[in-house]
Image (cartoon, grey):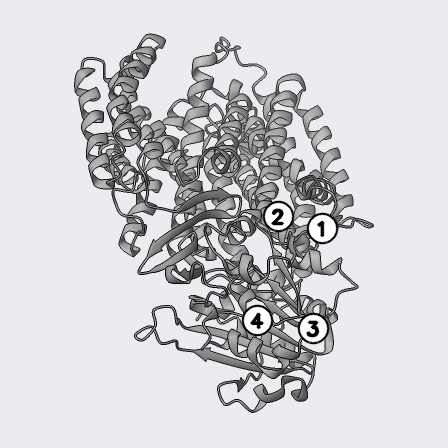
C-alpha cells in the first residue's frame, strides 16, 4: 500500500514538466502562427500598405499586454481551480471565432481611417482567440509554480519552451505551411490545434490544482517584497533594448539589401532564440566572454548607425550586424533572467516585460518615423544598450544627468556654430569636429563615467541634425525613407536604396524632360506608350507614381490617373524644385492616394485603355496586387481592347511566373520583354522587364509582331490566389 501511494504521488511530479512543456509549446506555436495567418486572410480586403502591417503588429502587441495583465490579475486573486474554470470558459468562447475568417458583413470603407478599420477587423476576427493564447505563457508558469513538478519554485525554464514553440512556428509558416497549403486549409489546421489546446490546458490546470494539495502541509515561506519602481524600470529597459534593436536592424537590412522574407525572419528568429538560450540555469557563454562580445557588438552597431561603416552595407557587414544584434539580445535577456523575481511575482514580471517589448515596437514603428527623417532609432537604441554594461555604482543619478546634459550642450556648441554660423558644409570636417568634441566632453568628465557617456552621446546626436548629408531632400514616412540626391549629372529619387526615378539636371527648364532609367525612350514601358495603341488610348492609369516620369509620354487629349500609396511620393513628384515631369507634362492628372487595389475596387465607373501596374520595387512583391483576383479586377477596369502592363523589374523574384499562370487561366494574350539597357552610351538607359497582357492578339496592334516582345507561356505552376501565394517559389 505504501509503495502504491508513493508511485501515485510521484507520477504527477514526473508528468508535470512534460505536460506543461507540451502545453506552453503548443500555445506559443499557435500564437506565432496566427499572426501571419490572419494577416494573410485579410490582406486582399485591407490592402498591402506597410502602415496596415504596422497597425496589425500594434494590435498584437497591445492584446499581448492585455493577456499578460489578465494572467497577472487572476493569478493573484483567484485559486487555481477558479483560474482553470475561467480560462477554459474563455477558451470555449474563442472556439466560436473558428475557423478564422473575415467577420460576416465587414467591408472596407475608403472614406474612414484605415488604422481604425484594421484594428476593428483584427479585433472582431482574431481578438478573442489571440487574447486567450497571449495569456498562456505567464499563466501556465504560474500554475507550474503551484504544482509538485521539478523546479516548481523557479518555473522560468518554461519560457524557453514557449519561445522555442514561437521559433518553430515562425519558421514553419513561410517554409512549410505557406508553400503547401492555402490560407483556408492552414486556418482549419490551426483551428484543430486550438481545439487540442483545451485538452492540454485542462491537464495542466488539474496538475497545478493537485500539486497545490500536495504542498499544503509545507511551512509557508516568508513572502518576498514586491518589486519596486527601480526593479520594474530595469525590466522595462532590458526588454526594450533587444526589441527596438531587432526592428532597427531589420529596417537597416531591408533598406540595404531588400525587403525579402528572410530579412524579417532571421532577426525575429534570433530574438526568440535568445530567450530560449538565456531563460535557463545553464548559460550559453560565461559572463566575462559575453561582456567582451557585447562591447564589440556595440562598437559595430555604433559604426553602422552613425554612418561610419558607410551609407550601405555589403553582405559581410550585414552578417556582422545580425551577429551583433544577437549578442545584444543574449546579453540583455541574460540580465533580464538574472533580474527575475520569485514565482510569487512571475506574472508581474512578464507583464512588465511585455510592456517593454511593446514600447520598443512603438518607438521604432510609430514614433521614429515622426521624430526622425533618417534611421536614427538604431543609434538611440545603441546608446541605451551601452548603459546596460554600467555597474550599480556607475548608473545615472539626477546629478549626473544634469552634469552630462550641461557638458554635452557646451561640447556640442562649437559643432553647431561651425555648421550653422560659419556654415562649413564639408561632411568630413564636421564629422571630425563632432568626434573631437565628443572626446573632449568624455575626457573632461572622465571622473564621472555615466555623465561622460551622456555628454558624448549628446554631441553625437547633435551631429545627426546639424551635419549636412548632401541630399536635396530627405524625409521619412510609414513606407520608408525618401532621398533626393544629385549625382553624375542626374537628380535621383531613392526610396530606401532603390532608385525610383531620375531627371537630367540639364533638362530643368525644358518643356518636356526625358524619362530615364526604367522609363527611358528605348525601354519597353516607352514602347507601349508610344505605340499605336498607346497613342490612341483615351484614358491611362498608372499604379505607382515614382517621380512621374511616365507622364511625359502623355498625348494631347489623354486622361491620365495615378495611384500612389505614399503621400510623400506624390509631394516629391509634384514639387517642381525637385522634379519637373509632373509639373510640365501632367499637372492636371489626379493622384488617387491609398492602396491601389482597394481604390480601384471602388472606381467601378472607370475604364482604362492602358493600365500600368508599376508598384514592384526592385526588391519587393506586393502579393495582393499579383494574384488571380487582382488581375481580374484590372481586367474589369480595362476597355475591351485595353492593355494591361506589369513593370516587374526585380532583383530577387521572377514575377512573370504567377502572371503567366493567371493569364493562361483567363485565356489572355501575354508577352514579355527583358530589356538589357545600354548604360555605356547613356547612364540613364537601364535594364527593365515588362509583361504585356491583353484579351486578344489584335488589341496588341504592332506590338504583337515586334520581335522584342516574346510570348509568355505558363510555367505550369499553381495559380496565385488571395488564398494561396508563395514568394519562395518564384525566387530567381
> SS at mark 1?
loop
* Residue marked by disc 2: 34
Considering depth in this image, is 27 or 529 the residue closer to the camera?
A: 529
- Crowd rating for badge 4 (residues with CA inside 10 Å; few <14, some 14–19, many 20+): many
Circle 1/circle 2 CB separation < 8 Å: yes
With 544 as the anchor, is 397 left or right in this view?
left
Q: Distance between the residues labelled 3 and 1?
A: 44 Å
Q: Distance between the residues labelled 4 and 3?
A: 19 Å
* Residue marked by disc 1: 100
Q: Which of marks 3 and 1 is nearer the N terminus?
A: 1
- Crowd rating for badge 3 (residues with CA inside 10 Å; few <14, some 14–19, many 20+): some
> SS at mark 2?
helix
Residue at point 41% right, 35% down? 377
Residue 207 image offset from top left, x and y in percent:
61, 31
Q: Is residue 316 above or below residue 629?
A: above
Considering depth in this image, is 445 or 493 the residue closer to the camera?
A: 493
> SS at mark 3?
loop
- Crowd rating for badge 2 (residues with CA inside 10 Å; few <14, some 14–19, many 20+): many
Q: Kindly tell me whether residue 282 is visible in this rendering.
A: no
Circle 2/circle 3 CB separation < 8 Å: no
Quadrant, the N terminus: top right
| Mark toward the viewer: 1 or 4 | 4
Q: How far apart are marks 1 and 4 (CA)?
A: 33 Å
Considering depth in this image, is 134 or 153 the residue closer to the camera?
A: 134
Snapshot quadrant of residue 422? top left
* Residue marked by disc 4: 646
Q: Earlier in the sequence, mark 4 or mark 3?
A: 3
With 239 as the anchor, is 291 left or right in this view?
left
Residue 73 image offset from top left, x and y in percent:
64, 21
Amino acid at each position: 500500500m505504501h509503495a502504491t501511494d508513493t508511485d501515485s504521488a510521484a507520477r504527477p511530479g514526473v508528468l508535470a514538466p512534460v505536460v506543461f512543456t507540451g502545453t506552453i509549446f503548443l500555445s506559443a506555436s499557435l500564437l506565432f502562427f496566427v499572426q501571419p495567418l490572419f494577416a494573410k486572410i485579410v490582406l486582399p480586403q485591407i490592402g498591402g500598405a506597410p502602415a496596415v502591417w504596422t497597425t496589425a503588429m500594434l494590435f498584437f502587441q497591445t492584446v499581448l499586454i492585455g493577456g499578460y495583465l489578465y494572467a497577472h490579475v487572476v493569478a493573484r486573486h483567484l485559486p487555481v481551480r477558479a483560474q482553470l474554470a475561467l480560462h477554459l470558459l474563455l477558451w470555449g468562447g474563442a472556439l466560436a471565432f473558428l475557423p478564422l475568417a473575415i467577420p460576416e458583413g465587414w467591408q472596407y470603407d475608403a472614406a474612414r481611417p484605415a488604422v481604425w478599420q484594421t484594428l476593428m477587423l483584427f479585433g472582431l476576427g482574431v481578438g478573442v482567440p489571440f487574447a486567450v493564447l497571449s495569456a498562456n505563457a505567464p499563466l501556465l508558469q504560474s500554475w507550474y509554480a503551484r504544482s509538485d513538478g521539478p523546479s516548481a519554485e523557479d518555473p522560468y525554464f518554461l519560457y524557453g519552451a514557449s519561445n522555442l514553440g514561437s521559433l518553430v512556428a515562425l519558421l514553419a509558416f513561410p517554409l512549410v505551411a505557406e508553400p503547401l497549403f492555402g490560407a483556408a486549409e492552414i486556418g482549419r489546421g490551426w483551428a484543430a490545434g486550438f481545439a487540442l489546446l483545451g485538452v492540454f490546458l485542462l491537464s495542466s490546470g488539474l496538475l497545478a490544482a493537485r500539486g497545490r494539495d500536495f504542498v499544503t502541509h509545507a511551512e509557508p515561506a516568508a513572502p518576498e517584497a514586491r518589486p519596486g519602481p527601480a526593479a520594474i524600470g530595469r525590466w522595462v529597459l532590458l526588454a526594450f533594448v533587444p526589441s527596438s534593436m531587432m526592428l532597427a536592424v531589420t529596417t537597416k537590412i531591408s533598406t540595404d539589401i531588400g525587403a525579402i522574407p528572410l530579412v524579417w525572419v532571421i532577426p525575429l528568429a534570433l530574438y526568440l532564440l535568445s530567450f530560449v538560450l538565456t531563460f535557463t540555469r545553464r548559460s550559453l557563454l560565461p559572463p566575462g566572454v559575453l561582456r567582451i562580445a557585447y562591447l564589440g557588438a556595440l562598437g559595430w552597431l555604433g559604426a553602422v548607425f552613425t554612418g561610419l561603416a558607410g551609407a550601405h552595407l555589403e553582405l559581410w557587414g550585414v552578417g556582422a550586424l545580425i551577429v551583433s544584434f544577437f549578442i545584444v539580445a543574449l546579453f540583455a535577456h541574460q540580465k533580464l533572467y538574472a533580474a527575475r523575481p520569485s514565482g510569487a511575482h512571475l506574472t508581474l514580471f512578464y507583464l512588465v516585460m511585455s510592456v517593454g517589448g511593446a514600447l520598443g515596437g512603438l518607438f521604432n514603428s510609430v514614433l521614429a518615423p515622426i521624430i526622425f527623417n533618417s534611421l536614427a532609432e538604431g543609434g538611440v537604441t545603441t546608446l541605451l544598450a551601452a548603459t546596460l554594461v554600467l555597474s550599480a555604482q556607475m548608473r545615472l543619478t539626477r546629478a549626473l544627468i544634469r552634469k552630462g546634459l550641461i557638458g554635452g550642450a557646451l561640447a556640442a556648441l562649437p559643432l553647431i556654430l561651425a555648421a550653422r554660423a560659419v556654415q562649413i558644409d564639408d561632411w568630413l570636417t564636421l564629422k571630425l569636429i563632432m568626434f573631437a568634441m565628443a572626446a573632449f566632453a568624455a575626457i573632461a568628465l572622465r571622473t564621472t563615467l555615466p555623465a561622460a557617456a551622456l555628454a558624448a552621446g549628446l554631441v553625437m546626436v547633435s551631429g545627426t541634425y546639424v551635419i549636412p548629408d548632401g541630399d536635396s531632400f530627405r524625409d521619412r514616412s510609414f513606407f520608408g525613407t525618401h532621398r533626393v540626391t544629385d549625382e553624375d549629372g542626374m537628380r535621383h529619387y531613392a526610396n530606401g536604396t532603390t532608385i525610383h526615378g531620375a531627371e537630367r539636371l540639364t533638362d530643368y527648364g525644358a518643356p518636356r524632360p526625358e524619362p530615364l532609367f526604367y522609363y527611358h525612350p528605348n525601354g519597353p514601358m516607352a514602347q507601349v506608350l508610344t505605340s499605336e495603341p498607346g497613342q490612341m488610348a483615351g484614358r491611362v492609369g498608372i499604379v505607382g507614381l515614382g517621380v512621374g516620369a511616365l507622364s511625359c509620354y502623355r498625348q494631347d487629349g489623354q486622361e491620365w490617373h495615378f495611384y500612389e500609396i505614399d503621400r510623400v511620393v506624390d509631394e516629391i513628384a509634384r514639387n517642381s524644385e525637385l522634379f519637373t515631369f509632373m509639373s510640365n507634362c501632367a499637372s492636371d492628372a489626379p493622384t488617387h492616394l491609398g492602396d491601389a487595389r482597394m481604390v480601384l475596387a471602388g472606381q467601378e465607373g472607370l475604364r482604362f485603355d492602358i493600365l500600368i501596374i508599376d508598384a514592384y520595387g526592385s526588391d519587393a512583391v506586393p502579393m495582393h496586387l499579383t494574384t488571380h483576383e487582382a488581375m481580374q479586377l484590372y481586367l474589369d477596369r480595362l476597355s475591351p481592347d485595353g492593355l494591361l502592363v506589369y513593370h516587374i523589374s526585380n532583383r530577387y523574384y521572377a514575377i512573370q511566373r504567377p502572371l503567366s499562370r493567371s493569364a493562361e487561366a483567363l485565356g489572355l494574350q501575354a508577352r514579355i520583354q527583358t530589356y538589357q539597357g545600354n548604360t555605356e552610351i547613356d547612364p540613364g538607359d537601364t535594364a527593365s522587364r515588362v509583361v504585356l497582357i491583353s484579351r486578344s492578339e489584335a488589341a496588341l496592334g504592332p506590338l504583337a509582331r515586334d520581335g522584342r516582345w516574346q510570348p509568355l507561356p505558363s510555367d505550369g505552376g499553381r495559380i496565385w490566389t488571395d488564398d494561396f501565394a508563395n514568394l519562395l517559389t518564384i525566387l530567381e
